[in-house]
Amino acid sequence: MTTPLRGFVLASAESFIRIAGVTVLERALRTLHYEDISGLTVLCPEGEIPEGILLDLKAFNIPFTLSPLDERGRADSSLLSAEGAQQVLLLDGSALLDSRLPSLLSQGGERFCFVPQECVPSQAALPSITLSGRSYLFAGAAKISLSRLAGFVLSSPLSLAQEAVEAIENEPELLLDLSTLPDYKPDMRAHVPFLFFPVKKPEDNPAAKSLLIRSSQKLVLDWPAWYIHRPIENALISKICEWSITPNQLTVLNNLAAFAALALFAAGFLTFGLVLALIVGVLDGLDGKQARVKLHFSPLGEWEHHLDKLYENGWYLALAWHLSAGGRISLPLISLGTILGANVLDMVLTAAYRRVFHLQFDDSGPFARALRVFAGRRNTYLWTFAPFVLVGKPLLGFACIALYALLSLMIKGGGIMFSIFTRFRKVAP
């Protein structure tokens, strides 16, 4: 039976600085907590955590043990009483670290994460090591044995970095160069470089926050989401992330606005409903960014996409209901059936593609990425519909949405079916 991996976080005065409303120490603990790392211990040279920060940690319900260091700056020997060969994760609690590191380090033997010096935006007085003519900095995370941890001097983040450098000087094979590893994140649909930002002072917050917001941005988006929503979302998140508002609260706000828009559409207040629906396009991106920037996730976030489908298709039903008033039934119902049918077939085809290729179709290549920009989706439908509402021709606009949906399905569906057919033709005997 494998012994559960334990996690240690080195705290310091820098660990208590808030970046995007969350202390650096809490970010490190959340990073380990979401990876189910057990037995979390905060190694604190001062032996205590400020009361306000301690209350924040307790509110988030992360179980951990606080342990002071001895007069030599070493971990309490009682923490290291298990078999010395047992391996643990050790994080620098004064730096923003990539959330992928615990999972990356959980497999295999001892390793120290390093990055090329030129990849680190904040480098103040960090010890470095030069290998093959390239200078590297310790990236704040390591998987080491308890016996090695027992010998480390951990009086400050610089001491930890120096211990890591000395370990690599003696055993270069333990260096894990993060810049050489695959950095594609399927949930972000983007290549995201591994994060490492040493925090030295509160004035680092703007630069660090900006880095977190950039790292939270999905790159495969339709044109309204990229050119209109993205800058507005980022400006709002730069303020909202400093508040205690949770991603779940933003999800609730978004859904209240979305279902209010549905009611307005059904009642015939199309202009007001459209304005609110366009606002929902921005609100819908805030909860995910807030979660990624503050590293605050919950099960509700996994259900958000189902709620999106519910109110989106509810909008089309409400519009068809209103537009069919006065006996104009055929065109609204045909348009509604086309839009809903296209949505269902799109989900079926994309699921089939993912099952065959283990990849989202939108990530499959330049054609799919370009198609995503203009393909029929909620955002592109709304902006197509908007001019018709403004000139008083909503029924024609609804029919144009249906034609847009049908054309998009034909192009995307044809690409998916061709890819699947080609794949099976290659493997056929």
Image (tube, helix red, strand yellow):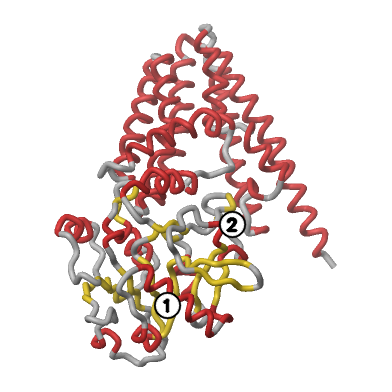
From the image, which quarter does the N terminus lie in? bottom left
**Residue 305 visible in image:** no
From the image, which quarter does the C terminus lie in? bottom right
Residue nearer the viewer, 428 or 154: 154
Answer with left or right where residue 67 lies relative to residue 277: left
Determine the residue located farthest toward the front in the rendered image: 125
* In the image, residue 63 above or below residue 346: below
Is there CB contact under 8 Å for labels 1 and 2? no
Mark 1 crowdedness (10 Å alpha carbons): few <14, some 14-19, many ≥20: some
Residue nearer the viewer, 32 or 252: 32
State the CA–CA distance, disc 1 to disc 2. Answer: 30 Å
* In the image, residue 42 above or below residue 27: below
Determine the residue located farthest toward the right in the rendered image: 429
* Residue marked by disc 1: 163
Disc 2 marks a residue whose amino acid type is: Tyr
Answer with left or right where residue 49 lies relative to residue 98: left
* Residue marked by disc 2: 184
Residue nearer the viewer, 224 or 294: 294
Q: Nearer the viewer, mark 1 or mark 2?
A: 1
The percent position of residue 217, horizontal first and vertical second, equals 50, 44
The percent position of residue 326, horizontal first and vertical second, equals 46, 9
Mark 2 crowdedness (10 Å alpha carbons): few <14, some 14-19, many ≥20: few
